[in-house]
Amino acid sequence: MLKAKSLYHLIVYSILFIVVLISFFTFIIISNAHDELQDKTETLKTDYTNSQKELIKSDVNNVINFIKYYDNKYKNIKPQEIIQKEVIEALKELRTDNMNEYLFIYNFEGVSLYHPISKDRVGNTYYELKDKEGKEVIKDLINVSQKPNGGYVEYLWYKLAIFKDTKKISYANSYKNWNWTIGRGVYLDEIDKLVKEKDEEYNQKISNYTLQITSLTIMLVLYSIFIYKNATILIVNDVKEIGKYFKESQKNDNPINQNRIIFGEFKIIANYATDAMNNIKLKTHMLEDLNKNLEYNVSEKTKELTKLIESQKTFIKNSVHEINTPLAIIQTNIDLLKMKIPNNKYITNIESGSKIIQYIYDDLSYLIKRDRVIYEKEYLDFSKILSQRIDYFEEIAISNSLYFINNIEEDMYIKFNNTELQRIIDNNLSNAIKYSYAKSPIFVKLEYLNDNEIKFSVTTHSKQINSVEKIFDDFYRENNARGGFGLGLKIVKDICDKNLVIINLQSDEEKTKFTYRFRINEDITA
């Protein structure tokens, strides 16, 4: 009866221990998932708001550049009223059909000049208009637009899609020649939808965790019962005999009766138990002292390494930031020198060096920002951008006794991010200049591959690439003597993989050719 009762308690306590242990880990998992959701939600809100602000700012400034161009082109040909009317008509043709995203124009007196959604507003004055919170929306937009770089205003505005007022943020800038305020806004309620999706994802994840943990708990409990039911029956008697021996050994030094133990393993344990216990006690104290010292040393070293890593990250980030200002000063002074002393080879070499620094700065800046910035896609004139980047690297090529031979088809458009496309072009042109033989041409070609794809290639006369399979790896360089960090082609590879761009590399003793196949539209499968 005593034996059965002890076994029963052992089983119950073991099951309770397993349940408590699993409950503890369940709590940790759910807590971590909740913290992860909060972090992702805050990051999502920040990234969404920043990306939308940059998007509307870019659209407004593009419209202002268009107005400035049109005004300068016709101001000596047509009356200003006709020019302004033609600009308004052009903007009507360019607008999208999205009733929640539109451009608006007021003059500095608050008169509505262009409002594609509420056309009956045009011609009326709204300078004193207030939202439900009392903010003078139009007045604030006009005031902020007259700052040097414009600005943002957040307010409540009626949204047709949901038939109620909701938060909106608008960017406004001005064309002061006409006393025009041009702005565009975006509603912020979309972020609530994204947060709701994250909440649903979190709830689903918790449900899955709960189901998995419940199943695991049941399996472990059943397995524990099975093990105890079978194993303890076999070993409990021997354990009791060994326990009885330890009790008796306190009174005498008689060895254990081997005939009372069934398993040979327990016989060996019984013979050496006393010596082992004494040794364990001695070594336990030694290990405790050693472990305390080791834990302290590990803790100190970990703190040092953590501090060093954080310092390195901060140093790189601050260095990239601090490079920008002196680099801009250098480039500005080079332009001034070129105006005073044209066609000077020393100034050309200095300009070449500054452009190389600018290209390296752009790479490092992209590496720092790529995990924190959403690179939105838009339709780009690939031909125009490629020609501009070739012009940028022209001075660098000349200073290295090289020259470009271009074969670029015109008006080739592609849906891509401008920053990422520039990184692909710049790294290929820079590497071509870096590794080409002196006085050799660099062939740059852009052409249609088929109705859905564009092919961009750069061909050089240079040393054969021996490790083609490693050339896109982090920090890998075929020739360490030519400088660089070995990051450029890694950046290119990551961008191409993300955007489904196919890379082909051919290299032999005569030439090296990098070829990239771009999809014209990301929605079209190759």
Image (spheres, rainbow, N blue to C red):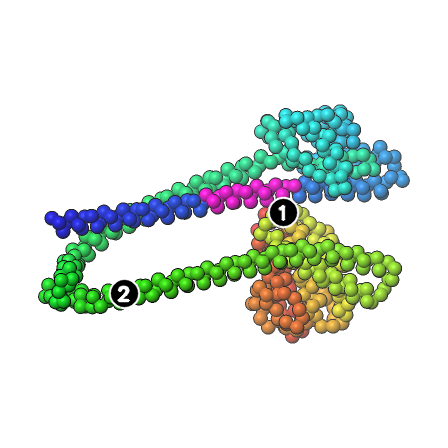
Whole-percent x, y for residue 115 in the image: 72, 30
Check the image and report above or below for 328 versus 159: below
Q: Circle 2: is it few (<14), some (14-19), or many (20+) Cα within 10 Å?
A: few
Q: Is residue 369 left or right of residue 396?
A: left
Give the residue number, with chain letter if any, for mark 2.
280
State which mark lies toward you, 1 or 2: 2
Residue in the image at 16% along x and 62% along y: 250
Q: Quadrant of residue 338?
A: bottom right
Residue in the image at 81% along x and 37% along y: 176
Whole-percent x, y for residue 110 in the image: 76, 28
Element on which disc 1 rests: loop
Whole-percent x, y for residue 1 in the image: 11, 48
Magenta segment: 34-53
Which residue is at the front of the view, 233 or 9? 9
- Of helix, strand and loop, which mostly describes the magenta segment? helix
Image mark for residue 50: none
Check the image and report above or below for 161 versus 250: above
Q: Residue furthest right?
A: 76
Which residue is at the front of the view, 407 or 505? 505
Marks 2 and 1: in contact by CB < 8 Å? no
Q: Quadrant of residue 487?
A: bottom right
Element on which disc 2 rests: helix
Q: Amino acid at mark 2?
A: Ile
Give the residue number, with chain letter if any, for mark 1.
376
Which residue is at the front of the view, 27 or 63? 27
Q: Residue furthest front?
A: 251
Check the image and report above or below for 131 versus 73: above
Does the magenta segment cover residue 17? no
Q: Circle 1: is it few (<14), some (14-19), or many (20+) Cα within 10 Å?
A: some
Q: Amino acid at mark 1?
A: Glu
Whole-percent x, y for residue 333 in the image: 81, 58
Give the spatial CA distance, label 1 vs label 2. Answer: 65 Å
